[in-house]
Amino acid sequence: MQQNSRSIALRKIPAIVVFCVVWGLSGLALAQLSSDVASLQGHERVFVAVSTPNTDVATQDLGLRKESLEKYILKRLEKAGVDASTTFTDQTLILEVNVDLIKVVESDGIRIHAFVSNFEAVQATVLAKSRRTSLATTWKSHKFGAITKEQSKLLRESVVKNLDNFIKAWEEAQANSGEK
């Protein structure tokens, strides 16, 4: 019975809201810069910067906590042989991890949130025309969707998939450069 009320609530979402959320989030994906695996070559250490919403919905309802996400990411990177830290020292590559939520609608007591899970590798680059040094995103992976509290697993899965994508790209880059 409860499953039926959820599907009914989801059907009540105005089509324009769904369109705007999907269009807006897909616009983020379309505006991305290069996702060049080769740009990950030659880096020995990675600085990991994690940001998450600090709201009751994120922390209590969905279990999204910055500290636990940082620990999970660092543990997975270490297991994959990536020297990573959340303390900036002399790293030449920054892995920016951003997970964000937007409340879309509430219907029949069920809150629906749009989410985006974004991983970006950022590094110093030289601009072609001015020859100035600037930070640029050279690799990225995005996942987005809409969830209820009961579907919070989908948010975690999107983070895991983005992390898997980064680790795979890192390993490929290091194998191609003869380093690890």
Image (cartoon, helix red, strand yellow):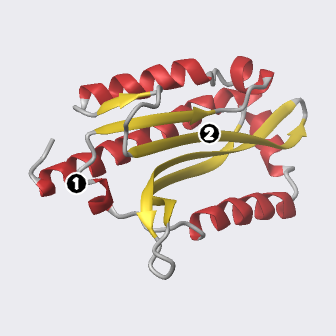
- Look at 24% across and 32% down and name the residue there: 80
Q: Residue at x 86, y 64 (%)?
A: 16
- Residue hosting label 1: 173
Name the secondary structure under disc 1.
Answer: helix
x, y percentage for residue 123?
43, 53
The three-letter amino acid code for the residue at tag 2 is: Val
Determine whether, in the image, residue 88 is placed left or right of residue 26: left
Q: Distance between the residues labelled 1 and 2?
A: 25 Å
| Residue 32 visible (yes or no) | yes
**Circle 1 crowding by C-alpha within 10 Å: few under 14, some 14–19, many from 20:** many
Q: Contact (CB < 8 A) between labels 1 and 2?
A: no
Residue 158 horizontal/vertical position (percent): 51, 41
Q: Where is residue 90 in the image (x, y as percent from the top left)?
A: 37, 36
Residue at horizontal 36%, vertical 48%?
165
Vertical placement of residue 13 versus 82, above or below = below
User: Is residue 139 at all visible to an observer of this figure?
Assistant: no
Upstream in sequence: badge 1 or badge 2? 2
Q: In this view, does 71 lie to the left or right of 39?
A: right
Q: Which mark is residue 5?
A: none
Q: In which quarter of the image is the C terminus?
A: top left
Q: In this view, does 91 lie to the left or right of 172?
A: right
Alpha-carbon neighbours of circle 2 within 10 Å: few (<14), some, or many (≥20)? many
Mark 1 vs mark 2, foreground winner is 1
Residue depicted at 27% across the width and 34% down the height: 82
The residue at which mark 2 appears reads as 99
